[in-house]
Amino acid sequence: MRITRTIPPTVLPVAKMARTATLLVAMAAVAFSSISAQEPEQVEVARVEVTPATLTLEVGEKAQLTATAYDADGEVVDVPMLFFSRGGRGRLAVDRNTGEIEAFKGGEYEVNVLVMAPTQARGLVTVTVPWPPLDRVEISEEGGRFYVGVTMRHKATVVDRADDVRDLAVVWNTSNESIATVDRYGVFQTHAPGEVTLSATAEGVVGRIRYEVADNPVTAMAVEASQARGRTGDVIRVTATPSNASGATVDDMPVTFGLIADPDAIATTDFPPAEVDEQGRFVAYQPGIYTVTANVPGHTAHTTLEILERHAAEEVTLVGHAAVRNVSTSDLWVWEGVDGRDYAITGTHAAHGSTYWWDVTDPANPVLTDSLVVDARTTNDVKVSEDGEICVISREGASNRRNGIVIVDCTDPRNIEIISTFDDELTGGVHNLFIHDDHVYAVNNGIRFDVINIEDPANPHRVGRFELDTPGHSIHDIWIVDGIAYTSNWGDGVAVIDVGGGEKGGSPANPVLISRFRDIGGATHAAFPYRSPTGRFYIFMGDERGAPGFDGQDPTRTPEFMSGYIHIVDFTDPENPEEVARYEIPEAGSHNMWIEDDRLYAAFYQGGLRVVDISGELKGNLYHQGREIAVYKAFDPDGVVANAPFTWGPQMHKGNLFFSEYFSGMWAVKLQPRRVLIP
């Protein structure tokens, strides 16, 4: 990448302002190795009025909301305000800057208008969207041949004319109860040969499938396990083979797997000691002896497994702390500089546009080398190019309401310089970004990502963009590996996009969708791809559920503000992705993550920093399997909020684990095998 060190005249005043702030902050850092400058004075807002206060929209209709902020004297104040929908992503689209809304799916939603002032005043609008009429009922199976004596549960999905799935009860029936019956839960059982129709009805709309029931041909059953011994969390595959009188395998005979558990520690818990799914994949949460059974009508076979403790835990020790105590810290990036030393940059959230630059060559003694103030309220994301020469900073809440990105020369982190800014069609705000092969992929106003060429960083220019076509779509984050982009799209899940490394002919100028995975039942905030040494390819999809505005002052209320977990989706076959596992803790929700060498490093807000063993095949809830390697919660009595861990984002670098804490800056810890005392 070619570095142009000349600063364009249009950004020179900003650079001078930043340099003055840098010198002042750096001088303070020499004495204290932390940041504690005063935050600029902000306008006090007493209340926010939104018009209209209530609203009813049909699916497909739009409306315009307006908001006015008042101070304590009742005078109108001009401050930036953000519009957002609580619980309505993908259902009610809200332009966060203009307040235009569009209804896509039925339901009742709250639209909040937030002013990031000291009072965090807000307004509220309730929007009602009547449900459209029903369109169809879909049954989970396709029909075809079935065998006498087999029992299988069927599921029904009710869909309305807006293509929205409805949570409605259905009535099940069969056309001939002498051949087959079905109960109220869709459990279908066959009794005699013949033809039968299975139906599910909701509000007069009927879904049907047809079966040809035949006599049961199975005369023998065999079962085999991929291994006889394992550890908690190991996935053991049990294969069942039903055969007929001639010895041929009956491939279309459904097999039901069961489990007889004898765990070492018998206790009442809120989760089972082990599980086995319909494909015969077994995983244990507690050590013990387990018998897996395979059943078809008239025949049963079994295999017995011995499960041992996983013993994954390690000791985590504090290495160093780069304290930021005047404003909230957002994301971080750690890299090796062109001079061979190690550096880190941290952003700030709901603050005054600061970023802080650190020498972390000795992570036990991080040294503030420089700082930069840009025109923004939040510098949420910071990334450094692969060669360590260019940093790009995201901007939100600029005073002139033109946000975009700031491109910085960081070849000398003790003397950083702004090279250029780019805000063309990025004025709505850039929350997250990624740098890959001399291009910046910037999340634009939560709607799409724009691709900006920075081969000449003094003259950035847009070359492409990508946007989903789903109703009410949105995007929060982007991560790129080997020319494949993985975008986090809230209710639309993850999109996998070829930007130059796939087989779809994509490029930075022409991003091409490869595949999507939507059905996680959550809100995808961050995604991280990982190709396991087992040969399986996983995408870790982190939920974020909660209400904006939590200030950390009342730890007992944090679960209601921050919840959600990490969904683990097997993308080995991109045409048939499958959610196979999760990492969910009871006390907090997920935020950003990092994966390296069979380890998941996850930020879980008030739940702290979590390190998880993800070796081998994955299934079930990893939290209960003994896969947790370490948990670390950073307490700082002098933080923005005292002693309030609120972990934002982790990154491994040269054996040290760095992570940003919202209320106290950047920390570094180290993991070591747990010492065992031998008598």
Image (cartoon, rainbow, N blue to C red):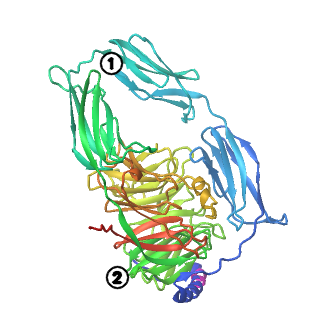
Secondary element under disc 1, as helix, strand or loop, is loop
The reply to whether residue 412 is visible in this rendering is: yes
> Principal SS element in the magenta part?
helix
Q: Is residue 106 left or right of residue 163?
A: right
Count numbered badges in the picture.
2
Of labels 1 and 2, earlier in sequence is 1
Residue 9 lies, with reference to residue 397, above or below; the image says below
Q: Is residue 234 left or right of residue 413?
A: left
| Quarter in which the N terminus is drawn | bottom left
Give 37 or 1, whichever is nearer the viewer: 37
Q: Which residue is mark 2?
A: 340
Neighbourhood count class around disc 1 (C-alpha, 10 Å): few under 14, some 14–19, many 20 upward: some
Residue 393 on image: x %, y %: 51, 71
Residue 219 is a magenta residue: no
Residue span colored magenta:
12-17
Residue 592 on image: x %, y %: 47, 61
Amino acid at pointer 2: Gly
Amino acid at pointer 1: Gly
